[in-house]
Image (tube, grey):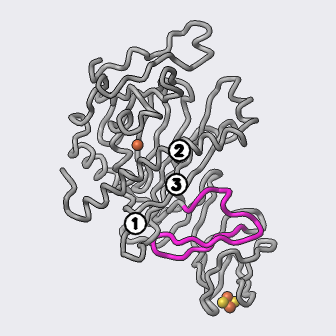
Amino acid sequence: MSLRTRPSALPVPATDWRSRIPISRVPQPREDRMTATWRLARPARIAGALALSQTQNSGGWFVAGASGDVGRTESVARTIAGREVVFWRNASGELVAGPGACPHLGALMDRCPVMEGTMYCRWHGLAFSERGDTTWSPYAALDDGVLLWVRLPTAGEEPTAAPSLPERPPLTASVAAVISEPGLCEPQDVIANRLDPWHGSWFHPYAFSHLVVDDAASDESKLVVDVTFRLSRTWGVPVRAEFTCPDTRTITMQITEGEGAGSVVETHATPLGVDAEGRPLTMITEATIAYSDRPGFRVARWMSPLLKPGIKRTAKRLWVDDLDYAERRYALRRRGEFPG
Ligand code: FES
Ligand SMILES: [Fe+2]
């Protein structure tokens, strides 16, 4: 197979049953029959795309978790970019965020009771409203329907009114699932991992095969990839996908052709702070927003509580490997041994 040619299994022939069933017989090749991708995955090319992604303005916005992480009856405290931040919901259910330490005696305001939009500090009952006062000022916060965001004062970032949300399919017609995993690396290591799609078939053979980057359609700001999502060693779902970075801490993969066109996987890297040994901790929050205009997908949406664990399981397995990659990249950079 030529490196520049799309795999012969693409596109799916439009016979009746095949147009209804997106699965193709695409036997998984053995390693010694697979095309090596190391010549294509040039360190300078990945570094160029990463550098371009890092010139954007994230506006001080950080992903803080999944929409479902903060309920109406209790606060949640998280450390983001070295700051303790408390989250709760006001009387209308909108997200509220602010400094996580109580101005009275410094309690961390985690799991504090919330009643009708007012949060009460667990230590002595000091009440907090979304408006704040002279001792406590809220941060801008947003629940976008899938993820929670907070805007923090951030060096080098001009504050913006809202985060640059990636293009998403209609949420009412999609199944969204979010996973989070912490890693010992910096956000740029997470983005760099995704800016190297060439590792897909080799490093994740259980999930991908026949991965080809379409160089003619790609540039430093966009990578276009033809890939088969593995269902088994024999069967797979061929799709075309695009990787783009809407801000410095986010990379998205949107399926543009094939089953689930319009679906998006958003990978957000949130710096948390440093561990006891001074190593940076980064939370990877990955939102998979699966969409399909097939009639069968409506039935699947009804079953979304059953589907979500499956989507999460696959995303977690991929991230165990990709975290290894990102952490290794960081360790090499720290030692001054990163190639390229
Ligand atoms: S520490 Fe919060 S009310 Fe005293
Ligand atoms: Fe990967």
Residue on which the image places disc 3: 285
Residue 284 shown left or right of residue 110 in the figure: left
Compared to residue 190, the image places residue 126 above or below, namely below
State yes or no: discs 2 and 1 in contact (Cβ < 8 Å): no
Whether 271 is drawn above or below 174: the answer is below
Residue 229, position in %: x, y? 48, 29
Distance between mark 2 and mark 1 Cα atoms:
30 Å
Give 81 or 133, whichever is nearer the viewer.
81
Q: 308 or 313: nearer the eye? A: 313
Q: Alpha-carbon distance for marks 3 and 2?
A: 10 Å
Is 18 in front, or is 209?
209
CB at disc 1 and ligand 2 closer than 8 Å: no
The quadrant the N terminus occupies is top left
Which residue is identified by label 1?
157
Q: Which residues are magenta?
A: 64-89
The amino acid marked with disc number 1 is Glu
Residue at disc 3, CB closer than 8 Å to ligand 2: no
Q: Position of residue 66 (x, y in %)?
A: 61, 56
Mark 3 neighbour class, 10 Å CA radius: few under 14, some 14 to 19, many 20 or more: many
Q: Nearer the viewer, residue 257 or 278?
A: 278
The answer as to whether callout 2 falls within 8 Å of ligand 2 is no
Mark toward the viewer: 3 or 2: 2
Q: Which numbered disc, 2 or 1, marks the residue closer to the eye? A: 2
Q: Secondary structure at mark 2?
A: helix
Mark 2 neighbour density, 10 Å: few (under 14) some (14–19) many (20 or more): many
Say which residue appears at 44% left-offset and 32% top-offset.
208
- Badge 3 or badge 2: first in the primary sequence: 3
- Amino acid type at circle 3 is Thr
The residue where tag 2 is placed is 315
